[in-house]
Amino acid sequence: MSSSPPVPSRSPGRRFALAAGPLLVLGYCVINSTKSVLEGALVQGLSPEFIAFNAFAVAQAFYFLTLRDKQALRTAVRRCLPDVIMLNISTAVCWIAVLYAFTVLEPAVANSMIIGLGPTLTIVLGFKLRPGTKPLPLELAAAAAMLGAMTYLLVMAHDGASALGDVPTGDLVFGLVMCFLTSLSLSGITFYTRRLGDAGMTVPQMMASRFVVLVAATLVLLVVRDSFGTYSPANVGALLAISLVGVIISLYLLQQGIVRTEPITVSMLFGTNLLITYLTQFLDPRLDQSQHVFLGIAGLCAAMCLGTWARWRHDRQTSRAATPTPTTERVER
């Protein structure tokens, strides 16, 4: 009578290693959500370009000065200059647009629009750019549900049921345009980051050359609009927190988390970003939290997880079908 060998138990160190990736991504989500609420409060008294200029000038200096091999950076930038410029432009549009969105929309609603528009834009552009690739039925259903949830949030904001009360139609349209630009530029950041990575440019080199256009553009806006703010102790502390914690530390956590985590887990954890933003808004006394916004965010997160799960299941089934079984291998031999 034979007995099956005992299954080795996972050591605490192994369990911690498996949990480290999701915890790092979740840490990024918590920091990013808190940063959004802080930025939403700051743009009520400071111009978006003033916040972005100061926060990213510090971040750009940090990434450049901590990069040891400056000669390799210059070589990489010269070799990939068009893509480096496009990454810079995408980054500048992304951060400036999202800060302007926060001037008229509460952070939870603005982030919902930005995250929710991403899959829809990907599907729509895919029909044109990749005609041979069709979205899955569940992905289409998820995208439709996201659009429905976003429409619900916009209607609630227009009717005064958001945390900011009644949002005028003009402000609502302006905020939606800024969210669209942010979502579109996020796609550009992903695309050009991948192109630069494929061309051999390292992540530290990308970060050391990524915010140049953003710093220059916000400086021009500051001069043209004469929108310089005051460097009070409170403002300086908030700007340093955004730069050091909200940009430098959070992006490091995200980078380390992604390489340790399955893509489906990362995508679903990003869905928690919206719920965490909603909860963090309780710390902002100017916001009167809305149950309608929570319902819209919950529906959006559920649809996002559905679409991610559908693609993961499809890719797993395709991979299994393409992998030959031992029996098949013996027949072919």
Image (cartoon, rainbow, N blue to C red):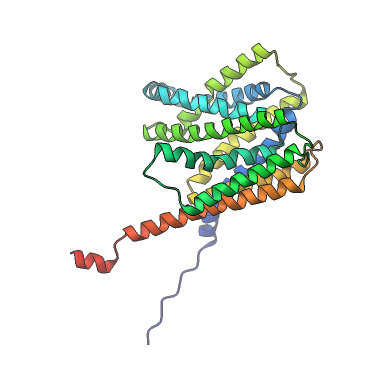
Q: Which x, y percent locates residue 88?
A: 50, 25
* Residue closest to the far bottom: 1
Residue at horizontal 44 percent and vertical 75 percent from the top: 6
Say how many tags the image has.
0
Residue at horizontal 74 percent and vertical 25 percent from the top: 235
Q: Which x, y percent locates residue 230?
A: 75, 18
Res. 75 image quadrant:
top left
Which quadrant of the figure contains the N terminus? bottom left
Q: Who is closer to the viewer here, 145 or 196?
A: 145
Q: Is residue 302 above or below residue 254?
A: below
Q: Which x, y percent locates residue 33?
A: 66, 40
Q: Can residue 16 be seen in the rendering of this structure?
A: yes
Q: Who is closer to the viewer here, 292 or 1?
A: 292
Res. 177 image quadrant:
top right
Q: Which x, y percent locates residue 5?
A: 41, 76
Q: Can residue 265 be seen in the rendering of this structure?
A: no
Is 228 left, or right, of 324 in this rendering? right
Is 124 left, or right, of 222 in this rendering? left
Which quadrant of the figure contains the C terminus? bottom left
Q: Who is closer to the viewer here, 302 or 80?
A: 302
Residue at horizontal 71 percent and vertical 48 percent from the top: 294
Residue at horizontal 73 percent and vertical 39 percent from the top: 157
Res. 246 image quadrant:
top right
